[in-house]
């Protein structure tokens, strides 16, 4: 890695001393941008409910100065573990989508995961975007040819320059068991929040109702875990 | 595996999610409605996202060599492709 300049962390905190801290792990790559506004609305709702909330920039993402091609999932896992270790009092880690692939090295009192996704699925979509863009430019590529190329050199996928290590780790990354954890999907029922998959959207949107549902679900999970 | 009868509804919901069409616009898509090249939201990233979501939601696998520009030309083409995949 290049210089270890501290990354930006968005803090939204309650007026008094917090009941507990929620460390959010954002979705990866473009999905983070599409979800960010709704995620921050959920942080505001949690802060109003007495929780301290944090949303760290992963190196190579958002405002980070680190080139993306210098990081990989293992680095992100360690960065999150370090961030979690600096937090006083009970901590809940709340991960969205691909964030759930990097949240298990950190120590926490509980985990909460929204619509977790396997690394292979994220990688497949990024590679397909490259194949589709290549096709528009009359360049012939395929998932196989890109995979072969990625073994030895960084690959530019939908604007993300990913190292061979990152691509290999993404292709194999699965959700790791942690305890206690709650997994929530989108939809209706006991283990779901109502909303739309904003992280898939071609153009960023926001959903205040969904943000409120996310905040309420995390707050209830905190109570269930006996945290506060 | 998804039932053929529900493929149309699944596909419309998927396009609504990815392209942010809203239920009304997604519901109003006809067989002749243009997709790639006709809807500004439908860029190469959206094509990729639609393919991965089709695999997840329809329980199918799509190979590279099955994908050509024609599939995404119209809603009717995409529906026909999906129906063929789920009944394969």
Image (spheres, coloured by chain):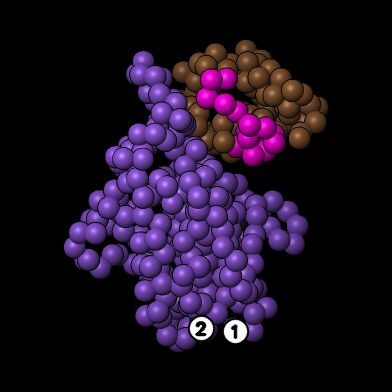
Chain colours: A purple, B brown
Q: Residue at the location (35% across, 61% down)? A: A75
Can you say which quadrant of the picture contains the C terminus of chain A?
bottom right
Residue tagged by mark 2?
Answer: A90
Q: Residue at the location (52% across, 25% down)? A: B64
Task: Kindly report which numbered mark, 1 or 2, lies closer to the viewer in this rendering.
Answer: 2
Q: Residue at the location (75% across, 57% down)? A: A189
Can you say which quadrant of the picture contains the N terminus of chain A?
bottom left
**Chain part drawn in magenta:** B53-67
- Name the magenta segment's main secondary structure: helix
Query: x%, y% of residue A87?
Result: 41, 81
Q: Quick check: marks 1 and 2 in contact, CB under 8 Å? A: yes
Residue projecting furthest to the left: A3
Q: Quadrant of residue A111?
A: bottom right
User: Relative to residue B22, is residue A163 drawn left or right?
Assistant: left
Relative vertical location of residue B35 with respect to residue A170 in this rendering, above or below: above
Residue tagged by mark 1?
Answer: A228
Query: x%, y% of residue A123?
Result: 47, 42
Q: Residue at the location (42% across, 47% down)? A: A168
Residue A95 visible (yes or no): yes
First reached walking from the N terminus: tag 1 or tag 2 = 2
Q: Is residue B31 magenta?
A: no
Identify the element where label 1 is drawn: loop
User: Relative to residue A123, is residue B88 drawn left or right?
Assistant: right
Q: Quadrant of residue A10?
A: bottom left
Same chain for labels 1 and 2? Say yes or no.
Answer: yes
């Amino acid at each position: 890695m290049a210089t270890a300049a501290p990354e930006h962390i968005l803090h939204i905190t309650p007026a008094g001393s917090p009941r507990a801290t929620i460390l959010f792990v954002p979705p990866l790559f473009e999905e983070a941008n599409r979800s960010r506004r709704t995620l921050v609305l959920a942080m505001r709702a949690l802060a109003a409910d007495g929780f301290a909330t944090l949303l760290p920039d992963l190196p190579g993402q958002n405002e980070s100065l680190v080139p993306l091609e210098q990081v990989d999932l293992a680095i992100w896992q360690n960065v999150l573990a370090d961030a979690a270790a600096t937090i006083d009092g009970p901590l809940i880690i709340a991960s969205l989508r691909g964030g759930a692939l990097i949240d298990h090295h950190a120590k926490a009192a509980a985990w909460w995961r929204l619509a977790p996704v396997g690394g292979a699925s994220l990688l497949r979509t990024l590679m397909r975007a490259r194949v589709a863009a290549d096709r528009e430019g009359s360049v012939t590529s395929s998932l196989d040819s890109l995979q072969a190329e990625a073994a030895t050199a960084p690959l530019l996928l939908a604007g993300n320059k990913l190292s061979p290590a990152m691509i290999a780790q993404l292709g194999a990354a699965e959700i790791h068991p942690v305890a206690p954890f709650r997994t929530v999907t989108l939809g209706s029922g006991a283990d779901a929040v109502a909303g739309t998959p904003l992280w898939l959207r071609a153009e960023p949107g926001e959903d205040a109702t969904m943000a409120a549902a996310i905040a309420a679900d995390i707050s209830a999970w905190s109570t269930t875990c006996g945290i506060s | 595996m998804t039932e053929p009868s529900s493929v149309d509804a699944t596909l419309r919901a998927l396009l609504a999610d990815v392209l942010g069409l809203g239920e009304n616009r997604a519901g109003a898509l006809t067989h002749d409605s243009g997709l790639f090249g006709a809807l500004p939201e439908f860029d190469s990233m959206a094509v990729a996202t639609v393919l991965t979501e089709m695999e997840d939601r329809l329980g199918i696998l799509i190979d590279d060599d099955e994908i050509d520009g024609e599939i995404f030309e119209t809603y009717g083409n995409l529906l026909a492709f999906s129906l063929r995949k789920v009944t394969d």
